[in-house]
Amino acid sequence: MLPHDTPELAALDLLCSVARLGSLGQVAQRHHVSQPAVSMRMSQLERSLGLHLLDRDRSGTRLTPDGERVVAWSQRVVGEAEAMMAAVEGLRAQRRSRLRVAASFTVADQLVPGWLATLDGAMPDLSVTVEVSNSAGVLERVTDGSVDLGFVEGNLEPPAAVATVAVRDDRLAVVTDPAHPWARRGAAVTGDELARTELVVREHGSGTREVLETALVPFGGLRTRLELGSTEAILAAARSGRGPVVVSLLAVAGDLAAGRLVEIPTVGLDLGRVLRGTWLVERGLSPLAKRLLEIAGS
């Protein structure tokens, strides 16, 4: 613990300048302060240390023997402080050009690449890392401060320490391979039918699964045939005829356009959801994170 009378770094910096320049007027010009202010700070420094540091006469200002010893120590202290601040500025510059993002599978696969391309076009020196997880995992990464910004899907309730904002709407779609009986029927699938059907679904913690489970609560809940850990695995199961799956319309758009899968209309089901950006309240949003959030919501 430093003694209460430890001099301020700014005063020691002024003293070092006096030793180099030998003139209070030149020191004042160099530090952009008035000469009386420099003189006052030197007098305060002498009083706080209990030492006579400077001799002043018409020819200038000279160090006393005690002043020379204090300047030698001060130069080391000021030099270390300058090195520390240079390192701190390096960290600030790194943070200004570095962005750590976590995103749920659907958002990471379908949206993040386009958002980052837009951001990179304006900031070519940008360094970005993207972690992909289910929505629960993203919230964990945001909460423990491992990432600057997270993107989640579904209606998971974030911790109080995490702020969220909606960036866009999404909808889940019931899809099957073209040979499935549902693909050839003319009527929409009801909530009762979907609840009675064993589905290939995502794992617990997935925003997609959470929305589907909530939608099926009035009809008796979700029945599962197989749980898989990624949207692409779910789509592969649907293409191979493993049965109906429920996925984001964003994720299945390519398969629907190519005819590999067929969307089955539904009735009486709310499969809409919101994609949200999340961040740690106490940290706030860095300029980079704020800009990416603006791109995501545009």
Image (cartoon, rainbow, N blue to C red):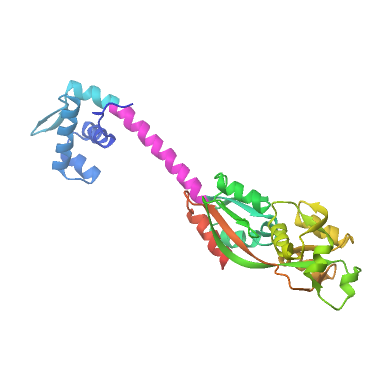
From the viewer's perspective, is residue 181 above or below residue 201?
below
Q: Nearer the viewer, residue 206 or 145?
A: 206
Q: Is residue 88 magenta?
A: yes
Q: Is residue 286 left or right of residue 116?
A: left
From the viewer's perspective, is residue 194 above or below residue 62?
below
The prevailing secondary structure element of the residues shown in magenta is helix
Q: Is residue 177 magenta?
A: no
Q: Nearer the viewer, residue 7 or 61?
A: 7
Image quadrant containing the N terminus: top left
Q: Nearer the viewer, residue 131 or 9?
A: 131
Residue shown at the point (63%, 50%) measured from the top left: 138
Q: Is residue 148 left or right of residue 173?
A: left
Q: Is residue 277 left or right of residue 38?
A: right
Report the label total: 0
Q: Nearer the viewer, residue 34 or 294?
A: 294
Give the percent coordinates (x, y) of residue 119: 56, 60
For residue 251, say whether it is visible: no
For residue 12, say whether it is visible: yes
Q: Which residues are magenta?
A: 74-97
Residue shown at the point (68%, 50%) measured from the top left: 133
Give the percent coordinates (x, y) of residue 230: 76, 53
Give the percent coordinates (x, y) of residue 56: 11, 31
Where residue 74 sits, quadrant-wise, is top left
Residue shown at the point (50%, 47%) measured from the top left: 95
